[in-house]
Image (tube, helix red, strand yellow):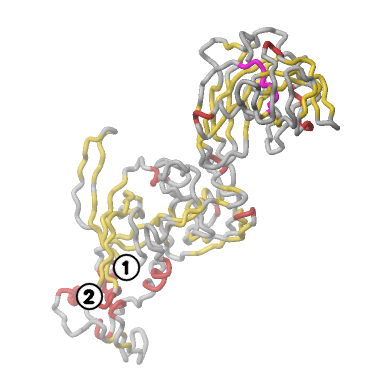
């Protein structure tokens, strides 16, 4: 069509076309940056044609989606991409004589916020034209500027004005810039072959680089995973991977404590050693002559309660158990921004979900039967081994443990063990949970393995409260408005459990309870707000002591 026409060039020549493509992270916007080009003739003006497609081989074939007049910033922010799709981008410099057309008169896409982006208008011939005809009838004349250059088939036609009532472009040059003037029919036939029938505005004298950069449109960074139609993307995997045990935990936790009166008045050590055989399971509780209530005798306590109370006595009163803080892994809730659509696993070093894929990742469990809020776990003997790994010496230790049936534990929950002086020892990841079953479908103990986690792991950055004793207090935050589907606000509150030693809000460093599918991190008494260095969910709360 156009032979040996001058085209823009680059300095140095190998730095051509597109340079960087980056998904902004809001699920809609991709930013592109390109290298600076120079016109072959100083009198020529420059623009940059932006190509992209979801199919790599079609990137150029589909034609330029936009032209950018940003010749100084060399950047464009393009919106309305589909979340999760992968796109291929090419940017080519193009030059033109300002007398041919004015790019500022080209139409703009109202959905784009970048004021430098323009559209090349496209239309169809409304009638056939011959090789000499200067009146070019088209179907959509309003979108074309008052003067310019169009491409019909392989021919360039320069027009000086347009007649809007007759939908006609008034041409001054057929076969412009050395192209061949031909017959053109509405179906694309030009007397020799059938070509694309679309009439396009001329994209200028364009260089031909083929530098392609691939980028996926994702949610990440401070924008989280919020969209107006759908709200915050939530993952409801509970029931698929682990059971939702909140209801069962509430039922199991409220069993009567071992009373040590009546038939149970004897020393527990003698009871378990077999030296005292006058008591029996499911027998009599309390007595008629005092202690925990005159004439308050109870018989036939359920087998489940009796089993649980004896196990609790083993852990607590005989002293074989260790009080630990339980961090329950969240399996459903608002999806973290690091969980991209093209990978079904999160960033293991993510500071927002701690490698779980769910915002905040863990929720601290407060055991209502103990004032310190901890659960009791029996740690079996284990061999500690230092192994040489690629990163250096690593400590390997796995305990065989057991605990009560409530709260229900799941693989990947985390427990925190403490030294006798109350300082944190290590954090352990729960593995291979075995739910023991007694008679008549009654539950027994929970057995599991606990694997020590090295202190460089992201799990150690989860905030928690070590001890709620001796007077745990539960505070409710102020109401927050989570943006839901169609931007409808969801009012909700969270609970924060503290102990009597907390006298100032700034002393609170932990997580809140789960509400509306998410938790919040509390740092120095302040619930993390939106778009700070820690991210956010578009809302915040306050804690008032």
Residue 154 visible somewhere in the drawing: yes
Q: Which mark is residue 87?
A: none
**Residue 116 on image: x %, y %:** 70, 27
Closer to us: mark 2 or mark 1? Answer: 1
Residue 204 lies in magenta, yes or no?
A: yes
> Up-down: is 305 above or below 330?
below
**Taking 247 as reference, is 289 left or right?**
left
Marks 2 & 1, CB-CB < 8 Å contact = no
Residue at image point 19% right, 73% down: 269
For label 2, the SS is helix
Sort mark 2 into few (<14), some (14-19) or many (20+) by Cα contacts within 10 Å.
some
| Mark with earlier residue (2, 1) | 2
Q: Which residue is mark 2?
A: 268
What whole-number distance in Å separates the C-alpha atoms at marks 2 and 1? 21 Å
Give me the residue at 60% from left, 55% from top.
485
Residue 274 position (above or below residue 53)? below
Q: Position of residue 159 (x, y in %)?
A: 78, 20
Q: Residue furthest front?
A: 191
Q: Nearer the viewer, residue 336 or 543?
A: 336
For residue 383, above or below residue 271: above
- Residue 325 lies in quadrant: bottom left
Compared to 388, does 431 lie above or below?
below
Q: Main secondary structure of the magenta part?
A: strand
| Residue with the mark numbered 1 | 405
For the C terminus, the quadrant is bottom right
Magenta stretch: includes residue 520: no
With 417 as the anchor, is 43 left or right in this view? right
Q: Position of residue 450 (x, y in %)?
A: 28, 53
The part of the chain drawn in magenta is 199-206
């Amino acid at each position: 069509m156009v032979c040996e026409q001058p085209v823009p060039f680059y300095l140095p020549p190998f730095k051509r076309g597109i340079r960087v493509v980056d998904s902004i992270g809001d699920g809609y916007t991709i930013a592109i940056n390109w290298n600076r080009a120079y016109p072959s003739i100083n009198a020529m003006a420059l623009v940059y044609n932006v190509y992209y497609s979801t199919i790599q081989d079609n990137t150029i074939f589909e034609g330029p989606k936009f032209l950018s007049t940003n010749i100084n910033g060399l950047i464009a922010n393009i919106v309305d991409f589909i979340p999760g799709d992968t796109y291929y981008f090419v940017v080519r410099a193009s030059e033109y004589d300002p007398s041919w057309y004015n790019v500022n008169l080209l139409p703009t896409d109202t959905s784009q916020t970048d004021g430098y982006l323009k559209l090349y208008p496209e239309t169809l011939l409304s009638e056939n034209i011959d090789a000499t005809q200067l009146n070019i009838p088209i179907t959509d004349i309003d979108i074309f500027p008052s003067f310019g250059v169009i491409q019909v088939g392989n021919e360039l036609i320069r027009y000086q004005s347009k007649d809007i009532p007759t939908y006609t472009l008034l041409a001054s040059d057929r076969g412009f810039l050395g192209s061949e003037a031909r017959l053109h029919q509405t179906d694309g036939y030009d007397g020799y072959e059938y070509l694309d029938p679309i009439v396009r505005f001329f994209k200028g004298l364009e260089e031909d680089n083929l530098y392609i950069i691939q980028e996926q449109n994702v949610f990440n960074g401070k924008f989280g995973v919020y969209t107006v139609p759908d709200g915050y993307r939530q993952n409801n995997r509970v029931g698929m991977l682990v059971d939702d045990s909140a209801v069962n935990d509430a039922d199991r936790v409220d069993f009567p404590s071992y009373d040590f009166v009546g038939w149970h008045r004897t020393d527990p050590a003698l009871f378990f050693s077999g030296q005292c055989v006058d008591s029996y399971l499911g027998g009599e509780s309390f007595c008629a002559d005092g202690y925990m209530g005159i004439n308050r005798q109870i018989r036939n306590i359920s087998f489940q309660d009796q089993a649980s109370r004896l196990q609790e006595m083993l852990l607590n009163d005989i002293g074989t158990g260790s009080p630990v803080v339980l961090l329950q892994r969240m399996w459903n809730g608002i999806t973290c921004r690091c969980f991209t659509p093209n990978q079904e696993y999160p960033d293991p070093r993510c500071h927002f979900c701690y490698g779980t894929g769910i915002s905040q990742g863990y929720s601290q469990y407060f055991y209502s039967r103990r004032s310190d809020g901890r659960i009791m776990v029996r740690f079996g003997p284990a061999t500690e081994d230092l192994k040489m790994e690629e990163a250096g010496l690593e400590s390997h230790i796995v305990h065989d443990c057991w605990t009560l049936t409530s709260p229900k534990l799941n693989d990947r929950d985390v427990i925190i063990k403490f030294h006798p002086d109350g300082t944190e020892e290590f954090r352990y990841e729960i593995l291979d949970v075995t739910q023991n079953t007694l008679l008549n479908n009654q539950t027994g103990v929970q057995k599991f393995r606990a694997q020590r986690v090295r202190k460089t792991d992201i799990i150690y950055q989860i905030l928690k409260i070590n001890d709620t004793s001796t007077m745990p207090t539960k505070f409710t935050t102020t109401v927050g408005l989570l943006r839901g589907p169609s931007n409808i606000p969801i009012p909700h509150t969270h609970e924060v459990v503290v102990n009597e030693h907390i006298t100032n809000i700034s002393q609170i460093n932990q997580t809140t309870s789960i509400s509306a599918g998410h938790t919040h991190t509390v740092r120095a008494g302040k619930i993390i707000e939106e778009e700070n260095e820690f991210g956010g969910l578009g809302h915040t709360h306050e804690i008032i002591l």
